[in-house]
Amino acid sequence: MAEAAKEKIVIEIARYSPETDHEPHFESYEVPVKREWVVLDALNHIKDNVDGSLTYRWSCRMGICGSCGMMVNGEPKLTCATFLSNYAKDGGKIRVEPLRYFPIVRDLVTEIGGFVQKLKKAKPWLIRITEPKLSEDRFLQTPEQLDRYKQFSMCINCTLCYAACPVVGLDPIFIGPAALALAQRYNMDSRDEGSAERTAVLAHPDGVWGCTFVGECTRVCPKHVDPAGAIQQYKIAAVFDWLKSFVTPRGRDASSSAAND
Amino acid sequence: MEASSHDVLLVGGGGAGLRAAIAAAEVNPQLNIAVLSKVYPMRSHTVSAEGGAAGVAKSDDSLDEHAYDTISGGDWLPDQDAVEEFVREAPQELSQLERWGCPWNREPDGHIAVRAFGGMKKMRTWFAADKTGFHMLHTLFQTSLKYQPITRYDEWFVTKLLVDEGRVRGVVAIELMTGRIQAVLAKAVILCTGGCGRVFPFTTNANIKSGDGMALAYRAGAPLKDMEFVQYHPTGLPFTGILITEAARAEGGYMLNKDGYRYLQDYNLGKPEPKPVLRCMELGPRDRLSQAFVHEDKKGRTTSTPYGPVVHLDLRHLGEKLINAKLPFVRELCQKYQNIDPVRELIPVRPVVHYMMGGVSTDIQGATPLEGLYAAGEVACVSINGANRLGSNSLPECLVFGARAGKAAAEYASTHEAENGAILAQAADEEARLKAEFLDKRGGSERIANIRSEMQATIENSAGIYREEASLKEGQHKLHELHERFNHISLDDRSHTFNTELESALELGFMLEVAQSIVTAAMHRTESRGAHQRTDHPARDDAKFLTHSLIYRSADGRPRVEYSPVKITRWPPGERVYGQQAHQTQQAAKRVS
C-alpha cells in the first residue's frame, strides 16, 4: 500500500491572522503525495514539520465529525475524504481556502456560531402536543415511517452546503440548507407534532422561500442528505396547507396531525 | 482576571456530557448549568461509534444475563453493584433517547430492533444503522438546545481544575477564538472528556482524544483507576486507525500473513475452513486475535509499511455483490479514506487501540473522591468494564452514568454555597504559568510532533498488547525523559487567535501524564487479566489482584499505586471462557447464585 513517496505536489493555503493581516494571502508548501494521503494529511504534515502556526479544525478523519470542511480548488470538500493523488494526476496543484460565505477567524477556520444559532431556530427536537401513545415506555415507529425522515437525519453539520449556496452568499440571514433539512427531519418524524410550531421560522422570508432551488447544497453534501429535496418537499406541503386553509376552517391543524399519524 | 460562575459545569459535550447536562437541568430547573468543550458538541468523539448500544429489550433476555456477560467479559474485575445498576438503567436510558427522537432501527411492527454483538450471549444491542453514536450524539445535542438553563462554551479548552481546601471550585479555560484565559467557577464540575487513545500510535480514536479529563483530575489529586487495561481492536487500518468491523470477518473474510497464509490456525483458534465458523479462526475473541498478530510479527511474517507492520484482511473471494450488500460501509471507508478497494485489493490491518477501561475513579453516582468533582463516560472508571469492555456497553455507559453524575452534581450544587472568589488568585497563577511556559517562552528547541511520536512509540513498545517488567521499566524511564524534554518545547505560534499549536502542546502535557499512569499501573500488576497480558506473569492471580489499581500523583509528580477491592455481589470469579465451555460455566455460576 504505502509506497515511498517519490511524487510531490504544491499546496497553496490561504493564510490570515486578524492580529497581523488586513486580508488573506496565499502561501505555498511542497508536500509528498502518498496514495492514502488526503488534503488533511498534507495540512497535518505541514503543521507538524514545517509551520506549527497553520490553523484549521479536524478530529475524526473518517467523515463523521464534520470539522474539516474547506474549499479545495474552489469546491467545498471534507478534506479528510479528498485524496491528494486526485489532483497530482494532472501535475496540478491544490489551493485550499476556508469555506466560502463564513466569516474567517484565522487561516482555514471559519466562524460557525451563527450557523449553530440557525440550527436552533429550526427547533430540532421532538415536539408533542398530545399525550404520547407509548409501547413499553417507547413510541412505535415502523421501518417505513423511519425511512420518511431518515435521510434528513444524516446531516453532520459540516456546513459545506452553506459554502455552496448562492443565496447564503447574498443573504447571510437566510436560514440555509442544513437547518431547513433538519426542521424537515423532525416534521417528517411520525413521533413529532411540531410542524405548526416550526412554520413561523420556515415560512419566514428568510426560511424556505429564500431558497431559489439551485440545488448546489445537495450536490456538495458528503452524506447525501439532499437539503434541496427537503426544502422542495416543505414548500409543496406549505402551499397545500395554505390552499387548504381557504377550504376548511383550521385546515392547517388538520393536515399537520395527518402528517403525524 | 475575568470569571463567570455556574452551579454545575460540564467539561466535555459528547454523549455523557450532554446527558449529564440534561439530567442536571431536569433535577432542578433553577440551576445554572454550563457545557464547556474544546469542540462544538456535535464534533465529540461519541459521533464515531458505529455498532450499537446494549440494553435488555426482548422477553428471551434478562438483566442477570446482561450482567453476567459484562462481568465475565471483564474478567471479574467489574464492580458487580455498578454492573447491576447499569444493566437495570440501560434500557430505560435507551428508551429515553427514543422519546427524544433517536432514529433507532425497528422491527416491521414498529418495536425496537436489536442485533447480536461480540461477547453478548443474547441479542440486546440497539442500533441506528451503522452510525449509532452519530445519531445518539445529534439527538442529545439537538434535544439539549431546548433547555434554557444550559449555557454553552463552545471551543474552550480547560487547562486546570481549581481546588481549594479539598474541594473543586471550577476551572481555568482558554477561549480558543480570542485566546482569553478565564476562570469558570462552579459548585460542581463533571468531567466527560472521553478517552486517551491518542497516547498510542495506532488508534481508532479521533484527534481530540488526548486524555484531558484524566490528566486534569490526576493533577488535582483524584486517583486514576485501572489504567493498565487498554482495549485493542484487531482490525484497524494502519495510518488512519479507521476500524474495520468484525462483520467483515463474520461474512467470511480471511486474515492473511505476508505469505498469504491464514496464520490464526497456528494459535489454538481452530482449523481454517472456507466458510466462517463461530468462535473459530477469524471469529475468535478480539484480544486473542490481537495477540496472534504480535507473535506473527515476532516470527517475521508480517508485511512492513511506513506505518509499521501489517497483516491483511482478504475479502476478495466474497465478491463485489456480497460486499456491496452486506459490507457497504467497510467498502466506503476503505475507498473514501484510505484509497483501497476491498473488492480487488487486500486490506492492510493491524491491532489498534480502541478504548480505555480505566479512568478517573468514581463511585456508583459518578462522584470522584475529590469533593465537588464528578466524571462519566470513557474518562471515568466506575467500574463496569473491568479488564475488558464488551462491545456496545460503552454508549449506554455514557447515558446511565452521565445521567447519574448529572443528578448527583445537581443535588450537590443545590445544597452547597458558591465559593467567595478567593480562588481567583489561583486562576491568576494559572494564567501566569500558561504565559511563562508557552506563549511568552523563548529559546525552546523541541518540536511538539517529535515528542508526541516518541511518546506514542514508547507506550506501544512498553505497554502494548503484551507487557513485561523490562520493557515497562524502559518505558517509565523514557517517559520521564520525554517529560523533561517537554519543558523545552518551542511554539511557532504566539497568536491569541485560535492557537491550535498551544492547544496541541497542552494536550501533549496531558498525554505524557496519562502515559506514565498507564505504564506504572501495568508495571505493578504482576498477573495477566483481560486486556492486561504480562508475558512474565501469564496467569490470573485472584488471591492478589482481584483489586482495582489506583494511581495517585505524588508531590514530586511521580505516580504512586494503591489498590482497592472489587465489589462482588452475586457472581463469584470464574474462568473467562468462550465457545462450548462458556455455557457450562454460566450454568454453574447460576447454581451458586
Image (cartoon, helix red, strand yellow):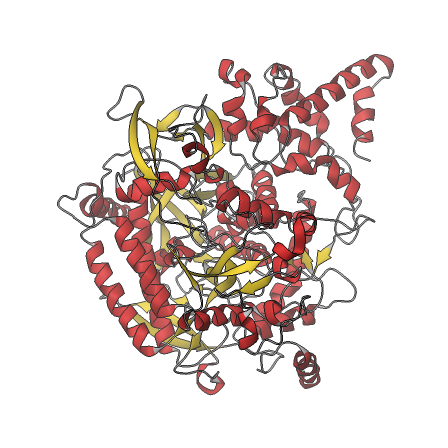
Figure quadrant of the N terminus of chain B: top left
The image shows residue B253, relative to residue A186, as above or below, that is below
Image coordinates for residue B323, horizontal then vertical, percent = 66, 51
Q: Residue furthest right?
A: A248
Q: How many marks?
A: 0
Image coordinates for residue B59, horizontal then vertical, percent = 79, 64
Query: Image check: A35 left or right of B123?
Result: left
Query: Which of A14/B548 is in front?
Result: A14
Q: Quadrant of residue B255?
A: bottom right
Q: Quadrant of residue B455?
A: bottom left
Is residue B357 visible in the rendered image? The answer is: no
Q: Residue furthest left?
A: B443
Is residue A210 visible in the rendered image? The answer is: yes
Figure quadrant of the C terminus of chain B: bottom right
The image shows residue B575, relative to residue A103, as above or below, that is below
Query: Which of B361/B56 is in front?
Result: B56
Query: Image check: A232 left or right of B301?
Result: right
Image coordinates for residue B95, horizontal then vertical, percent = 69, 52
The image shows residue B3, relative to residue B68, as above or below, that is above
Query: Image check: B159 left or right of B40?
Result: left
Q: Residue furthest front?
A: B259
Q: Which residue appears at 67% of the width and 70% of the height? A: B278
Query: Which of A64/B237 is in front?
Result: B237
Image coordinates for residue A179, horizontal then vertical, percent = 59, 28
